[in-house]
Image: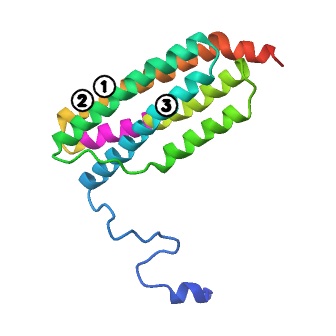
Amino acid sequence: MKTIVSKKETTAKPGVKKGVTKPKSNAASGLTELFEDGLKDIYWAEKALTKALPTMAKNATSPELIDAINHHLVETEEHITRLEKVFALIHQKATAKKCDAMEGLIEEGKGILEETEIGVVRDAGIIAASQKIEHYEIATYGTLRQFAETLGLTEAASILELTLDEEKGADKKLTEVAVNAVNLEAAEAD
């Protein structure tokens, strides 16, 4: 049986798979560099959240939601301080690198504000947008904590675990506000 090979397959460079993205010249080549890059990314994200959360709180009407957002703003400021400690532990300057994911999530949150009427429906939208942000942060802090453990950075891993637990707590609180009040009231608006 004869195998037919396309022209593209025969002209590909040996050992390079089709569709593989070529890394940038400054691409991480080890787990330490990947860890440091992730820290810079979430550092930017947390700083951006300190600007976005007050807007969300001002647009919310549920007292429980406003309290949850304001409480998380205080936590977010502490997360920034903790990240600075982690940077110090690895002898790096605390540097922010633009986080495209967080920028997109914040923009999506702004869009929800524009696309909803003030009241419980907007509150439900704010919770949805906020939980997307929390889930991104949970994934990021979980990954960074695991990288720190693998690299033997026990103290850094402990610090990241504290923040991870707070992000999970914020997500749980948002769920409680949604399930116990906001979503029910928003459904009644239909």
Q: Is residue 41 above or below residue 15?
A: above
Cα–Cα span, label 3 and label 2: 19 Å
Neighbour tally class for label 2: few under 14, some 14-19, many 20 plus, Cα within 10 Å: some
Callout 2: SS: helix
The disc at residue 162 is 1
Q: Can you say which quadrant of the picture contains the N terminus?
A: bottom right
Q: Secondary structure at mark 1?
A: helix
Tell me which residue sits at (18%, 40%) in the image. Answer: 88
Tell me, yes or no, whether the two marked residues, 1 and 2, touch with CB atoms within 8 Å: yes
In terms of sequence position, does the residue under pointer 1 or pointer 3 come before the other? 3
Q: Which residue is mark 3?
A: 134
Disc nearest the viewer among 3 and 2: 3
Neighbourhood count class around disc 3 (C-alpha, 10 Å): few under 14, some 14–19, many 20 upward: many
Residue 169 covered by magenta stretch: no
Quote the CA–CA distance across marks 1 and 2.
Answer: 6 Å
Q: Is residue 141 magenta?
A: yes
Dot 1 alpha-carbon crowd within 10 angstroms: few under 14, some 14 to 19, many 20 or more: some
Tell me where the magenta segment starts and ends, as one range. 138-148
Where does residue 90 sit, x and y in percent of width and height?
17, 44
Residue 29 point in image, percent of width and height: 28, 62
Image quadrant containing the C terminus: top right
Residue name at image x 74 percent, y 17 percent: 186
Residue under label 2, please give it: 158
* Alpha carbons under labels 1 and 3: distance apart: 14 Å
The residue at 58%/85% (across/down) is 8
